[in-house]
Amino acid sequence: MTLDVRDRQILKLAVPAFGALIAEPLFLLTDTVIVGRLPAPALGALGVASTVLSALVGLCIFLAYGTTAAVARQIGAGDTRRAIRQGMDGLWLAAGVGLAAIAVIWPLAPSLVHLLGAEGELARQAIVYLRISLLGVPSMLLVLAGTGVLRGMQDTVTPLLVSVGGFVLNALLNVVFVLGLGWGVAGSAWGTVLAQTLAAGVYLVMMFARHRAPFRPDLAGIRAAGTAGAALVIRTACLQAVLIIATAAATRMGEAQIEAHTIIFRIWTLLAFALDAIAIAGQAITGHALGSGDAAGTRAATRRMIVWGVASGVVLGLLTIAAGPFLPGLFDAEAAVAGELPAPLWVAALLQPIAGVVFVLDGVLIGAGDQSYLAWAGVWTTIAYLPAVLLVLVSGGGLAALWVALGVWMAARLVTLGLRARGDRWLVTGA
């Protein structure tokens, strides 16, 4: 593929974003590998608790995505001061949402775990992991918002450095707490909380020291940021509902199935964040281009990013297939779990080219501020998924069938986003 100016702009943002994005699933993947050394049902407990946490953080992803789009549009329009102010509104909103999440979810932890089908010792360990991890949620959300500010300013290198540092610290702390001190799943949770807290502190120092951001909260700006993010919350809630239903279905299939599903879902998440690097570039490029009034350049960049998304999906799919034989050993999977892995892993690999296009278009439309359409599209694609997963449960299908149902959902997303991108209603220019 011959690289032009547009390709270089995409890669300049996407390559560092790739490193930063995969740090989050690497947090979870590292936890999975380490906790996999513990006796059952520790790995299953991690999978159940992480599903709740992923849903929570996923619902709050608007703190990064919405902030990226808003800041990028202001930078494109030439108003850096307003861009910084909007970034701080996002940080204050992140802190408030994080504290509220602790207050609401802490007492609900047992109910949420049981809702996912966990019982007995599996449920007990899942509750321990979930409650400790909740203490790190405000830091996680501050990192999301801070990352969004810097991405909107076309800086994806700094989030990369912070993410790599957080990943290394998380891995070291998990080894010490889980394997060294013998704290079990609680040690894994504490290691991640401490790493996330340090990362949040770095972002706050940077905002105040490098960009001289105003500390005093602007209540009107915080309300505006929350209102703008409401549609993205609906969109993300639909995504998380699909994934939670899949985890609940796998849990009810049996202990071997939920452990195998946890492993494949960790791989899927890692691949999703890798593909999302182009989507992050799409958010920043689209917001900046539309802010400066360049609709034609936005469409041209979108076409080029779709090419990159397909190519990346093909490569990642092939790598997934190649990695398949090594996964049981990597996760120290028992024979029953290893036997459940191959078929659904093939399905996940074959979905990667579709995922590459879906994630790019999702990022482009977020960067354009087309949140209302994304919310409605999320509702319709979830409705398309429900009959497919219901058929799996009624027919007694296994993990492969469950992942085929997820493929139906991805195909529905491809259709809804593709139809929108072909039109012009999302190409709104100006600040």
Image (cartoon, helix red, strand yellow):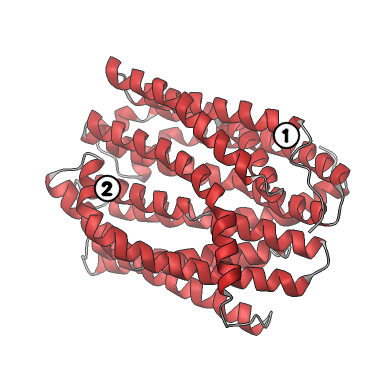
Using residue 255 as the reference point, say whether residue 164 is left or right of it.
Answer: right
Residue 393 sits above or below residue 334 on the image: above
Q: Residue at x 37, y 45 (%)?
A: 330
Q: Secondary structure at mark 2?
A: helix
**Which dot, 1 or 2, sits closer to the camera?**
1
Disc marking residue 116:
none
The kind of residue tagged 1 is Ala
Is any atom of residue 314 visible in this view? no
The spot of residue 369 in percent (x, y) is 68, 49
Q: How many labels were placed on the picture?
A: 2
Lower sequence index among marks 1 and 2: 2
Q: Residue at x 56, y 54 (%)?
A: 229
Using residue 54 as the reference point, say whether residue 418 is left or right of it.
Answer: right
Using residue 35 as the reference point, say whether residue 192 is left or right of it.
Answer: right
The kind of residue tagged 2 is Leu
- For mark 1, what is the residue? 421
Which of the two residues, 218 or 410, is positioned nearer the viewer here?
Answer: 218
The spot of residue 406 in percent (x, y) is 45, 28
- For mark 2, what is the residue? 43
Residue density around tag 2, few if under 14, some if 14–19, many if 20 or more, within 10 Å: many
The spot of residue 365 in percent (x, y) is 68, 43
Residue 388 sits above or below residue 117 on the image: above
Residue density around tag 1, few if under 14, some if 14–19, many if 20 or more, within 10 Å: some
Q: Secondary structure at mark 1?
A: helix
Q: Residue furthest top?
A: 395
Is any atom of residue 186 visible in this view? yes
